[in-house]
Amino acid sequence: MTLTVAVQMDHIATLQIAGDTTFALILEAQRRGHRLMHYTPDRLALSDSKVTAQAEPVQVADVVGKHFSLGEAEHLDLATCDVVLLRQDPPFDMAYITTTHLLERIHPKTLVVNDPAEVRNAPEKLFVLDFPDLTPETLITRDAGIIRDFRNEFGDIILKPLYGNGGAAVFRLRADDENFSALLELFQENFREPFVVQRYLPAVRQGDKRIILIDGEAVGAINRIPAEGDARSNMHVGGKAVATEMSDRDLEICAAIGPELKRRGLLLAGIDVIGDYLTEINVTSPTGIREVQRFGGADLAALFWDAVEGKVVG
């Protein structure tokens, strides 16, 4: 089977390939002989009811500094593709949301992964709250008084932007932190949306586990240990990936959310688990599959394409 696959992504020149999931997916698709087209979100267009992109044929190699070559750009009607991978990184802003509206016009005749309407309707820090029995105490608001009451109740809290990513602007605020008021003012000046306020989980010092699910099934995990003196485990900000196993509680969480991921067409998802709690469900451009394989886990890129090919043929 040879598929035509268009990848909507940040420019391939910007990737750090050693840990990049999008690159791993492209590499495996190339290994299988699929025709690959590369374009960035700004090259997407809608005209005469057609969704198109200025896209370039792409070839990849797992060689740092020489990891890609692009052919001559062409005006590609995305409806003629078999698969479109929606893989640009957040921020999950109106530009991102607009691309989901455009890609929704070609899905499911052209399989868009993940389903663009469901990506739009599942903001990662809100979607997780559909499962209150699995999550720590969480508040979504920009009301300073309500946030103060929450801190008074739980003492040690995390404050972060609702649509942030990569650990940016994530703060731990202890009960006696004198920066609390100033930080709230800073958030209110810089973010129009509500904020996420969450009870701090001390178990984060033992790691923030990233579990990958493909079509609703848990297929691999890594643990991310925060750097000394930092409450954030994101590898973008110094977190360290280490090998891990999925616990009974991890599997219980995956069993609870997996059917909903599958129902929504969220084929590739990455969830974050701290201790016994689910903290995020990542569906925009979830990462971690290269790290899983590096630490002896399954070849998740191969499992992903097995699932995609099954849906296209089916």
Image: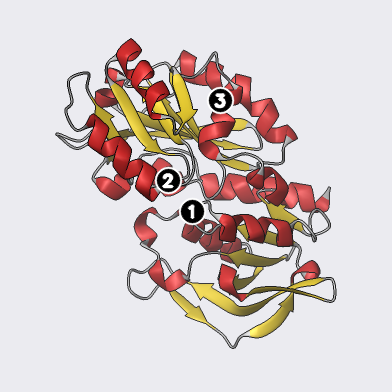
Answer whether residue 170 is visible to the viewer in this image: no
- Identified at 58% across, 56% down, the residue is 94
Asked whether the residues under the numbered discs 2 and 3 touch, taking CB atoms below 8 Å apart as contact, a structural biologist would say: no
Does 154 sit above or below residue 261? above
* Residue 164: mark in rendering: 2
* Residue 42: mark in rendering: none
* Residue 90: mark in rendering: 1
| Sequence-earlier tag: 2 or 3 | 3
Looking at the picture, which amino acid does disc 1 mark?
Pro
- Identified at 27% across, 19% down, the residue is 156
Q: Is residue 8 left or right of residue 165?
A: right
Name the spot of residue 120 as percent of width and height, x first: 65, 47
Q: What residue does disc 3 label?
A: 129
- Identified at 26% across, 47% down, the residue is 237
Q: Residues within 10 Å of mark 2 (few under 14, many from 20)?
A: some
Looking at the picture, which amino acid does disc 2 mark?
Gly
Secondary element under disc 3, as helix, strand or loop, is helix
Secondary element under disc 1, as helix, strand or loop, is loop
Q: Is residue 202 left or right of residue 77?
A: left
